[in-house]
Image: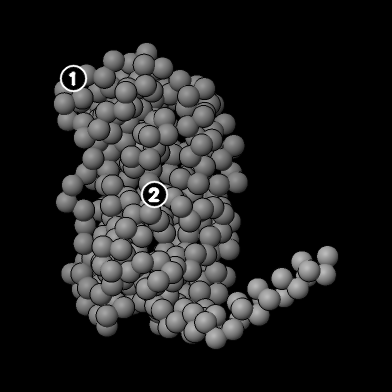
Amino acid sequence: MRRRSFLIGVVTVLAVGPEGALAQRRLEKMPRVGILSPADSDRLPIFEGFRVGLRDRGYVEGRDIVLEFSLTRGDYAALNSLVGELARVPVDVIAPVGFPATNAVHRAALAIPAVFVVADPVGSGFAASLARPGGNMTGLSLGVEGQFSGKWLELLKESAPQVSRVAYLWNPANHGNALSWEAAQRLAPRLGLTLESVELRDPKDIREALAAISREHAEGMIVDSDAVLGSVQAQILDFASTHRLPLVSVFKEWADAGALMSYGPNLPELWRYAATYVDKILKGAKPADLPVEEPTMYELVINLKAAKALGLSIPQSILLRADEVIE
């Protein structure tokens, strides 16, 4: 026992010796990026995309840059307090993930620059304009989400012509979601669809939201783009599968996980590009002078396995337009 204690003591001394102190000083001098997210893991595809983007610009995590992950694991109320904790670290740049985290950073009005990837940042108040964001935040826009909701409805109707009642799951606290819902309402009658609004502000209320969909006898589902909705993806997809509801959403990750299809921007790729903004800011650029960019390409992903389980035959016209078909 005494020998084992002695060896442990030696290791401890070495860890805090001259080399350890040098490594600690080097670590303290590295630029730090605070990542604020409601996620429960720092190994999600969007974070891997961000790491790849940093490596593309010469930053290797732990060698040239430190990523400070502040993850709330679904606790959205904790986002506000974690913003303050990142400011005290301190970090050089904050990268909020999703609308709730971006909103928390915006409300905090910190002097720390922030890089976002969010829908309709101008309408949400995060940027004065795309060309001149002003303030201390910039990044990438997912677009004005109203441009997607009509496409989701069209794809759902083309793929499942028998569907007439559609549950539209969205977060009314998200400005982009509100625009999408308004656009969907305008288009739905022209497609012969009746929309049922199902709101979800807090992931804890997912059971009530799904129960409402059952009561409305929905025959299909649209799930909008929002971090709250994404945090309960598994429950939503399990419900859709159990009730045999074709589901369309925005990101590829939904189709990969079992949704009928997705149409929208590639989120991991956008986060990969967001690293460009971080690099520019670390080199002295001001967020106010960095225009907010929008994706120029959107991808359609079709899950034929899900279609088969639903007894649907996807029209060839849609298959030919698909960027990826999951067999």
* Mark 1 element type: helix
Quarter placement of the C terminus: top left
Which residue was labeled with disc 2? 45
Which residue was labeled with disc 1? 316
Residue 125, by quadrant, is: bottom left
Q: Residue at x 52, y 28 (%)?
A: 239
Image coordinates of residue 187 in percent, x first then y, are 25, 35
Q: Residue at x 27, y 43 (%)?
A: 264
Image coordinates of residue 165 in percent, x first then y, are 39, 25
Q: Residue at x 37, y 13 (%)?
A: 311
How many numbered callouts? 2
Quarter placement of the N terminus: bottom right
In front: 242, or 306?
306
Image coordinates of residue 141 in percent, x first then y, are 27, 58
Colour setup of the view = one colour
Label 2 amino acid? Pro
Label 1 amino acid? Gln
Q: Residue at x 40, y 66 (%)?
A: 61
